[in-house]
Image (cartoon, rainbow, N blue to C red):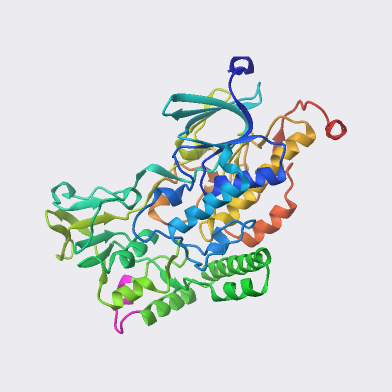
Amino acid sequence: MTQSEHRTVEHWDVVIVGAGLSGIGAAHRLREQSPDSTFTILEARDRIGGTWDLFRYPGIRSDSDMYTLSYPFRPWTNRKSIADGEDIRQYIVETAEADGAVEHIQFGHRVVRASWSSEDAQWTVTATTPDGEQVVTATFVYFCSGYYSYDSGYTPEFPGIETFEGTVVHPQFWPEDLDHTGKRVVVIGSGATAVTLIPSMADEVEHITMLQRSPTFITSLPEEDGLAGLTRRVLPDGIAHRITRFRNASIAVGFYEFCQRFPKLARRILLKRAASALPQGYPVEKHLNPTYNPWDQRLCIVPNGDLFRTIRRGKADIVTDQIAEFTPKGIQLESGTHLDADIVVTATGLQVVTFGTAELVVDGEVLDPHDLFVYKGLMFSGVPNLAWCVGYTNASWTLRADMSAQYVARFMEHLRRTGRRFGMPDPSGPGGEERPLLDLQSGYVQRVQSLLPKQGLRRPWTIRQNWWLDSWDFRRTDLDEAMVWDTAPAHTSADAERAA
């Protein structure tokens, strides 16, 4: 479509997709570092918060400490380091209100297509709304919609599930009226959601079981960070927040690197910590000793060891076995054991998607995300003026998300300063070297590797799970590195500076 066909369509310098943690952070960085850039936020739901508005299951909480999950520009002052979901959502809302980002949000706008025209040097973004399709144009599109589907979670096909007479629920779509009081509950899964649900429901149910096909590494962290509290008492909030954020991020990266280099020792430490929190003689080797090495999958955190305390009190147990079939009254396991259940929770994972399921088109060609190579963790080979926010898998999401938001703001200022209309990472990518985008063995990642973009073996075509190195590079990043710019800039850099 030509520009003349869209004279009545709103145009923005940046369209941000998603009003969750990443989208609100991106809005702040644009206002701060590219104040002349106009922007709007297209949000599919009716409320701010993203993940922290979608998930409503009992005990929903962060699985990263809040001093690194929160924004570096807005101190986290809640006493909890591992925070409840509603507290996190409220923090995002308050940030959006304080920044004025709320005024830029268009709720009920689900982005379904983004089409780039090199002739017009702009994206045409199509969104579905309650009033029908809406179209806007943008110089830059920044997807802050995460990497999982809000419309469907992942549930394997369980034989006989249709015969079960109880209630089956996926945590992503928790019914508000579900009463679990006095019920027998089985939670299928052993990830962050499962280890959160077990202690949160244990005191109200008759009994609750975590049924896992294979174990997961689980470790305990304090719910409150005593050192952070002390730092806040003696220093201004902003300085205290930065110190605690740096300390916690460094510990997270340091432990990850330790696990990668010394997996046997890391395994012994994790198992010893778990055993010390459980009843004497508890079969830790069977239930908490995975076949994979620490941090080959994401490590599960339990605040103050709440899961271990619940097991110690006899209110919950862990069963490691395979499901043979569902029965009218519960689940039959391959070992011959039958788990009686009134409610079965399928905490079996997310459905990973790219670009919020939106279709991307460049000059009339529909893109296959798997053909693309990631560039500096957010842009893609041969795709002009577009980025996708993907956080760390081994540390807090926001540590990378905030750097990505600042990169987008700098990119927009670079366009403005040089007079260029667009830039794209080299379409040839890293020259044939490739590996999966996400280096995790988790099932939810392995199921979709053939659908995700790829990465190379060296920068700027790789995603390093190392905040230290990324922070160092970010301060010195070269916007021209492996970048192909519009060959016909409107004017030179000197002209642009004189005009400004």
Residue 285, position in %: x, y? 33, 75
Q: Nearer the viewer, residue 262 or 392?
A: 392
Residue 246, position in %: x, y? 64, 66
Is 466 left, or right, of 480 in this rendering?
Answer: left
Q: Residue furthest left?
A: 328
Look at the image and tell me whether residue 405 can be seen. Answer: yes
Residue 198, position in %: x, y? 31, 65
| Quadrant including the C terminus | top right
Q: Which residues are magenta?
A: 278-287
Q: Residue furthest top?
A: 4
Q: Nearer the viewer, residue 70 or 471?
A: 70
Residue placed at 60% from the left, 49% from the top?
98
Is residue 254 inside the magenta stretch?
no
* Number of numbered markers: 0
Residue placed at 58% from the left, 51% from the top?
95
Is 340 left, or right, of 92 in this rendering?
Answer: left
Look at the image and tell me whether residue 382 can be seen. Answer: no
Residue placed at 44% from the left, 75% from the top?
270
Residue 218, position in %: x, y? 40, 69
Is 412 left, or right, of 21 in this rendering?
Answer: right
Q: Is residue 211 above or below residue 133?
A: below
Q: Is residue 30 above or below residue 398?
A: above
Magenta stretch, main secondary structure, is loop
Q: Residue furthest bottom?
A: 280
| Quadrant including the N terminus | top right
Q: Nearer the viewer, residue 168 or 463?
A: 168
